[in-house]
Amino acid sequence: MDDYIGTTRGADPHRGSDQAFTSATPQGPAHRAGWEQPESRKGFFTDTSICIGCKACEVACKEWNGVPQDGIYELLGSSYDNTGALGASTWRHVAFIEQRKPLGGQTTGVTIGVPETSVGADVVLGELSADFDGSAGTDHSALDLFGSLKPAKAPDKPLVDLGMPAFDLPSASPEAGERTDFRWLMASNVCKHCTNAGCLDVCPTGALFRTEFGTVVVQDDVCNGCGYCVAGCPFGVIDRRIGDKNKPKDDIANKNHGVAQKCTLCYDRLGEGLTPACAQACPTQSIQFGDVDELRERAQKRVETLQAAGVMGAQLYAEDPEGGVGGAGAFFLLLDEPEVYGFPPDPVVTTADLPRMWKNAGFAALGLVAAAATAFVAGRK
Amino acid sequence: MSPDADGARSDDRDVDYQLGQQESGSKAANPERSDGDRLADAAIRAVPGTEGQGSASATARRTGGGGRGRRDGKKGGGRRRKGRAEEMMVPDATFTSYYGRQVVKATPWEADIPFYLFAGGLAGGSTLLAAGADLSGRPHLRRNSRIVAAAGITTSLLALVHDLGRPERFYNMLRVFKPTSPMSVGTWILSAYGPFAILASGTEVMKLLPWRFGVVSDLVDLSARPAGLVAAAFAPAVASYTAVLLTDTSTPAWHDAHRELPFVFVGSAAAASGGLGMALAPLAESGPARALAVIGATVELVVEHRMEGSMGLSAEALHLGTPGRLMRASKILTAAGAAGALLLGRRSRAGAVVSGLALVAGSVCTRFGVFEAGQESARDPRYTVIPQRERLDAKRAAQAAGREPAVPPTSVRPGPPADSAQTTDPTSTQETTS
């Protein structure tokens, strides 16, 4: 089971020059694919510990890449997720996980009860008197920005709760009680741009190719939609796009219909020296774009920081060059086990077993010849 | 059997929508769903990250085998009958997933592909039969087998092109030759095999026609034997590479079968081509076809049984639901066909026809069963998560044992199961939370 790392690599005479299989080579996947002077390998480090689930990445990706609508975006009943999974028309997917787990070792800075100086707690607003005309003697210090918009309070009537949202901190109300163990995990998923990419290995048309940035991209005008890459991907990223027959052919819904589609790491933007749209749009730098080598160091420091701070379960995912996909170009810092986020726990590129498969198929073919020969000898009677 | 992707997608959403409800509520709201039930069960068992969730067998056992944890109420008959054997096979593992959603994607392939698996195998086996019949002087067996091979490979190619997302671009397959892509290798095998198989059948077809085409007919007649032999050289590859086509994927039930599936597939090809050969040829000539059919059926049955033992968890997909029914039908038809070929094949033409057709039907069921089992195993996250989780835990355990002193004693721990005391370790919470 472990021999897919290392021992079967590099020694396979079947492997073509564009195949990503010798992850140990220092030049990286682009060089292996035949680029004589590749750019530095580019990728994403997605730090899910600071993801706020805003989905700006999903939107920016769709806008920049002209990705058609995927479903009708209704909530799926799984927290705030409304896209479900990566697919042909969802190249960034934000996962939402609600857990009864404590935020290990973290403090929010919130104390239980009403803070003395809390805004809105005891500041009287809206004393908008009739003599508010700038005349002397009126104390306007109680007015704030909203004061003029609020009706004067009638002191003799009891206040009625209209159920409007308060400006108080959630913990300020006396009923708030103790904080419960609860955390909300959010993570923006994306194509991993694997070093050993299953989709690329199994593509029979050469539509999937390794770019000079070490990323994996589909050529829309070459792919004939055989669908092999869909099953080739160990992460379930790539899919075949299905158009809408009710719409005209040039409608965006039918763009690249029947063709395998996935994240391109904004190949067009990279060529111009720009940051991919999702990373550009991310407001918290949860999605970090850069040279993979540098991102790896950054990720290592970050996970060590979190672990030292007592954030339980903090771990890097798909980053290890010794892993089953040879280290992904897009890797993640997770706060729980990979499968919690919908990732496979220990993905291995399927072509790692391919030499053995061809060998078995060869034996089987010889067996068929032997069986046929035997049949004619035995069936002579 | 393969819903179009739109259907699958909306179905997914329905199921997910029910996650927030009580389990009994979702069941009651959905009394008629069958495929949905299964997904909903899986989904309810697998709320993300909160707690460990029982596998089907574990849940079933916990609830006394009642409806609650069973994966599929309507399709559970066969499973319950053979419950013991399967429970032994299924590790009593628990797993976590993201709202029960699948991890890897099932291929968008539809019935075209399992049909091709069958027809390609039938063509490959028939070409070998035809070559042998040609060399050993069995004109009827040769004629039938050549025509079957040509028809099989032609319909295969049409099915393959039809299944593409962009059929008009099929020729892009011929841009490259990639040994890492079994589909590319297969394209070139078929490109080499197809024309010769069709050419070899030309002479047989023309003999059936009432008129001749002069010198063209002469040339076709002359080239029949060489073409048939060249086709026979590629035929074994046609029959066996399709196994690699399936196993070189991340689809659990296909990839896990990669040791044995090529032998199952060539066995199935031999059984189908031998079966059809003995059904169509007169008794005097069908001896080799019978022998090939019996050998093929035996290999298929024996190796398939071994395959189920070596696949691990995903072997379960071969026993449940539609794929389970197909595989059971395949075993019965193949065994009955082989027995019929042995006992009746030599004596009675009717017996030969019936057993031969049973073998053909068995081969069809094998191909569709294996295909559908793979698709099911991709749609259910347990087949992806549980084996990988076990592998990962084993790796981590080995790592921890290897460098014990490197682990810092206090809060700085090597990430992963750091909060296992909380709930990450599913087994620890299995009993307490459910």
Image: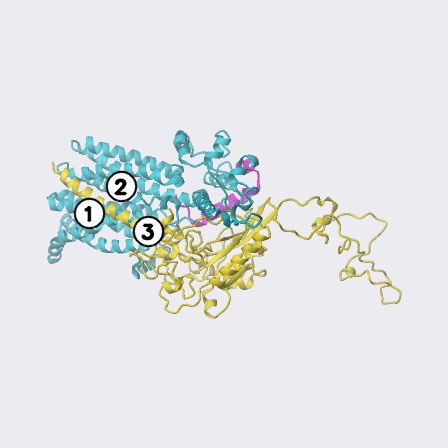
Chain colours: A yellow, B cyan
Name the secondary structure under disc 1.
helix
Q: Amino acid at mark 1?
A: Thr
Q: Residues within 10 Å of mark 2 (few under 14, many from 20)?
A: many
Question: Where in the figure is residue B350, as x and y percent of width and height?
Answer: 20, 33
**Chain that bears disc 1:** B
Direction from residue A177 to residue B331 in the image, left or right: left
- The image's mark for residue B127 is 1
**Chain that bears disc 3:** A
Q: Amino acid at mark 2?
A: Ser
Q: Is residue B10 magenta?
A: yes
Tell me where the magenta segment starts and ends, as one range.
B1-29
Residue B213 seen in the figure = no
Direction from residue B149 to residue A227 in the image, left or right: right
**Chain that bears disc 2:** B
Contact flag, marks 3 and 2 (Cβ < 8 Å): no
Question: Where in the figure is residue B188, as x and y percent of width and height?
Answer: 26, 56
The residue positioned farthest toward the right in the image shown: A137
Q: Is A191 rendered above or below residue B400?
A: below
Direction from residue B382 to residue B257 in the image, left or right: left
Q: Nearer the viewer, mark 1 or mark 2?
A: 2
Q: Residues within 10 Å of mark 3 (few under 14, many from 20)?
A: many
Count the marks.
3
Question: Where in the figure is residue B166, as x and y percent of width and height?
Answer: 36, 57
Q: Amino acid at mark 3?
A: Leu
User: Where does label 3 land, which residue?
Assistant: A354
Predominant SS of the magenta segment: helix
